Image (cartoon, rainbow, N blue to C red):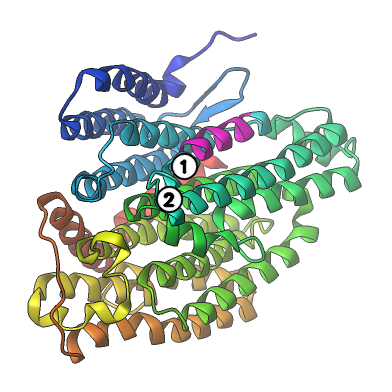
Amino acid sequence: MPPLNFNVILPLTALIVWACALLLIDLFIKNKRLTAFLAALGLALALGLTLSQIGYSATSFNSAVVVDGFSTFLNALLLTSGLLGVAVAYDYLKRTGLERGEYYTLLLFSIAGMMLMSQAADLIIVFLALELLSIPLYVLAAFGVPKVESEEAGLKYFLLGAFAAGFIVYGIALVFGATGSTALGAIVQAAETGSASPLLLTVGAALILVGLGFKVAVVPFHMWTPDVYHGAPTAVTAFMASGAKIAGFAALLRVFVLAFPTLAADLTPILAVISGLTMIVGNVLAISQSNIKRLLAYSSIAHAGYVLMAFVPYGQAGVVATSVAAGLFYLVSYAITNFGAWAVVIALEKEEGKGLEINDYAGLGRRRPALAAAMAVFMLSLTGIPPTLGFVGKFYLFRAAIEGQFYILAIIGVVTSLISAYYYLRVVVTMYMREGEPETRSEPWLNLTWGVSAIVTVLISIMPGPLFDWASQAVLRLF
């Protein structure tokens, strides 16, 4: 057995050690804002270590864990999402009476699971990472106790998450039975040499797809999303909508591209149907929502369909690199835009869940012009209207679908984007065209989150090349 290379998991180890230390240190901290600062410091340290690994590729732990451009790109995005998650929670937890130090520790452990998910090169590690990221999220979703909605959100997320984990475990068992291994490299080798059972391998891969489909909330595995997002504390929802989705797609991309390319002929039609249905269902159901949290929940379902569009041509050697790069770029676009939008939602949210109706945004353009302008940018970006990052991301996605000759899927993406304009622009119209006196909160870290997110959403859309080049290099190193 080759010697262990701990540099492979250096950022991950640093984050876990920091989280364990924070759990103990927090016992002696009376001002929980200091805990938030220490959590952000740990995330910044892990982010610095991650960025130092750019260009570095290695495997360890019997090739079960890998560091490469793909994992470095996603880990940097996940850690940035964690910093934004701390920022939006900083004042929110205090004013809602939820300021407890364990919130930040749970957040760090969940991010550690997400990072491990992006580095997993073995199906057992994928499952362990999934549980490490999910269990803290179950607790965070119910963090608003004794509110019934938060308790219900935590219970629903736990039950359906456990149900999805069962699918993944059963799928892993079938894949092991078909190939005799859970390592991604050994699986594809067994499939290519013909020593694997095609039926067991296909069914196992399908079950893994179902389990990860629950995590990223694609149709028909999306039912939990609106209730959980609506019931969970808004700061938790903001992080969950981005982080869990990024980690889920990281596992989907690595596992299916590296382990199951021989099954592309069987799985590609299924993936195309799921992607199309997710875009349609998410956008159509969002039209009738009057609550902003439920609207953004259905929006997140729709965007999972868009990201999945990049995954559909994974079996086409000439297209898969560009397609996966488009998916990675869109994950960045969605994460930045999503956090900005949720920061605005938190700024308008009042006690007992008030201030969450779209009508509560009436008059925001006159009362808080900068906040309204930022929200307008986020709504335009989610729609895919220039000059925003969402437009560039969708352009890359649609181009990848067309290059893979999935023309109908690209048409569905364009049409559903037009449908989404109705409910996204309804928020903009309400802010600027209707009279009202909305109550808003001006909190430094919250203001920084939505302000910087809005600026970045526009600036990167003007110069998207460097980010897309980084995503493309990450994919090339993956292969």
Could you say which disc has been placed on residue 240 in the image?
2
Residue 323 in view of the camera: yes
User: What residue is pinned by disc 1?
Assistant: 137
Q: Amino acid at mark 1?
A: Leu
Magenta span dominant secondary structure: helix
Q: Which of 202/426 is in front?
A: 426
Residues at marks 2 and 1, CA–CA distance in whole angstroms: 7 Å
Residue 433: image x %, image y %? 19, 91
Residue 459 in sight in this render: no
Dot 2 and dot 1 residues touching (CB under 8 Å): yes
Crowding at label 1, few (<14), some or many (≥20) Cα neighbours within 10 Å? many
What stretch of residues is rendered in magenta?
125-137
Q: Which mark is residue 71?
A: none
* For discs 2 and 1, the disc positioned in front in the rendered view: 1
Between residues 459 and 304, which one lies in front from this camera angle? Answer: 304
Task: Determine the secondary structure under disc 2.
Answer: helix
Q: Give the residue displayed 83% in from the left and 38% down from the top.
A: 174
